C-alpha cells in the first residue's frame, strides 16, 4: 500500500476507449438538477471521465487532471490458492490473480462523484461504458462481454502521475513516473463531514487487470485490454 498527498500527484480518469465522443459526465447547472450523460464532452456541464485520445498519448490529451485531490492511496494484493500436501505443514501457494485498488480523496465542491456512484434514476456510471460503447454499464453481465470490437471497454482507466516538483513537459517530465490502472470499477463512495474544516469525499476503484507503465512521465499508456486476458 502506498499513500500520496494530492500535491505530489496528478490523477486522470478516462473511459476505456480511444473512440471519440465516448466520455461520461453530467449535465445540469445545479446539483439538484443533474443528469448522467455519455457522449461528447461538449454537451456536459462537468466531465468525470474523458475518452482516451486515439493518437496522442500526452497527458494533456487525456483531459483535465482531477481537481482538489488531497490524497491518493494505491493498494496491491494477490489472491492465492493453497495446495496442502499429506504430511507437510507448509502448503504450496498458487497465484490466482492480483487486485489493484485506488482510493481518491478530494475536497468536496459539487455532487459529481456522488452522482457517478449513486446514479440518477435507472442510470449509474460505476462500471463505465456499456457494451459496444453504448450507454452505461450495468454490472449485471459478465465484464468480458462489455467490448468494443475485440477490446474491453469495461470500467475506467485511472492514470496517476508522480510529480518531481517541477511542472512541465519534455526534459522536466523525464524524471516523473506515470502508471495506468485499467478496467477499474467504482466500488465505494464516502463523504466525510467536518464542522470545523473542509468537507471531503472519497471514491474507491478496483480492478484485477495488470497495471501499465508509460514510456515517460508525461504520457499515459493507451494500450487497450483485449478480452482474452479477462
Image (cartoon, helix red, strand yellow):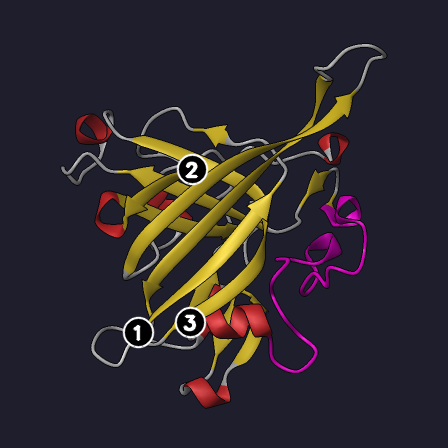
Q: Residue furthest top?
A: 87
Residue 227, image x and y in percent? 74, 36
**Separation of disc 2 and disc 1 at Cα?**
25 Å
Q: Residue at x 22, y 35 (%)?
A: 169
Left-right relation of 44 to 36: left
Q: Residues within 10 Å of mark 2 (few under 14, many from 20)?
A: few
Check if mark 2's residue and mark 1's residue have beta carbons within 8 Å: no
Task: Decide which of 55, 133 is in the foreground and name it.
Answer: 133
Q: Residue at x 55, y 32 (%)?
A: 223
Q: Which residue matches tag 3?
A: 191
**Separation of disc 3 and disc 1 at Cα?**
7 Å
Q: Residue furthest right?
A: 86
As drawn, the label of residue 212 is none
Of mark 3 and mark 1, the one earlier in the sequence is 3
Question: Is disc 2 placed on a helix, strand or loop?
Answer: loop
Q: Which residue matches tag 2?
A: 1
In the image, residue 145 lies in the stretch drawn in magenta: yes
Q: Main secondary structure of the magenta part?
A: loop
Residue 120, image x and y in percent? 61, 80
Left-right relation of 106 to 74: left
Q: Residue at x 40, y 55 (%)?
A: 104
Q: Quadrant of the N terminus?
A: top left
As drawn, the label of residue 199 is 1
Left-right relation of 39 to 96: left
Whether residue 66 is visible to the viewer of this picture, yes or no, is yes
Check if mark 3's residue and mark 1's residue have beta carbons within 8 Å: yes
Of mark 2 and mark 1, the one earlier in the sequence is 2
Amino acid at each position: 500500500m502506498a499513500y500520496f498527498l494530492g500535491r505530489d500527484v496528478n490523477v486522470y480518469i478516462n473511459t476505456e476507449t480511444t473512440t471519440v465522443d465516448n466520455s461520461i459526465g453530467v449535465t445540469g447547472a445545479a446539483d439538484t438538477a443533474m443528469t448522467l450523460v455519455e457522449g461528447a464532452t461538449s454537451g456536459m456541464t462537468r466531465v468525470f471521465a474523458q475518452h482516451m485520445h486515439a493518437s496522442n498519448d500526452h497527458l494533456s490529451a487525456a483531459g483535465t487532471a482531477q481537481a482538489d485531490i488531497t490524497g491518493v492511496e494505491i493498494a496491491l494484493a494477490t489472491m492465492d490458492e493453497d495446495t496442502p500436501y499429506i504430511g507437510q505443514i507448509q502448503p504450496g501457494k498458487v497465484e490466482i490473480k492480483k487486485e489493484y485498488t485506488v482510493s481518491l480523496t478530494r475536497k468536496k465542491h459539487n455532487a459529481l462523484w456522488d452522482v457517478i456512484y449513486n446514479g440518477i434514476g435507472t442510470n449509474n456510471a460505476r462500471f463505465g461504458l456499456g457494451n459496444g460503447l453504448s450507454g452505461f454499464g450495468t454490472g449485471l453481465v459478465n465484464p468480458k462481454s462489455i467490448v468494443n470490437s475485440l477490446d474491453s471497454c469495461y470500467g475506467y482507466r485511472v492514470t496517476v502521475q508522480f510529480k518531481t516538483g517541477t511542472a512541465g513537459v519534455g526534459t522536466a517530465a523525464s524524471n516523473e513516473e506515470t502508471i495506468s490502472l485499467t478496467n477499474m470499477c467504482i466500488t465505494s463512495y464516502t463523504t466525510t463531514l467536518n464542522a470545523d474544516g473542509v468537507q471531503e469525499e472519497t471514491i474507491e476503484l478496483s480492478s484485477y487487470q495488470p497495471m501499465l507503465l508509460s514510456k515517460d512521465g508525461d504520457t499515459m499508456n493507451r494500450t487497450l485490454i483485449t478480452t482474452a486476458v479477462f
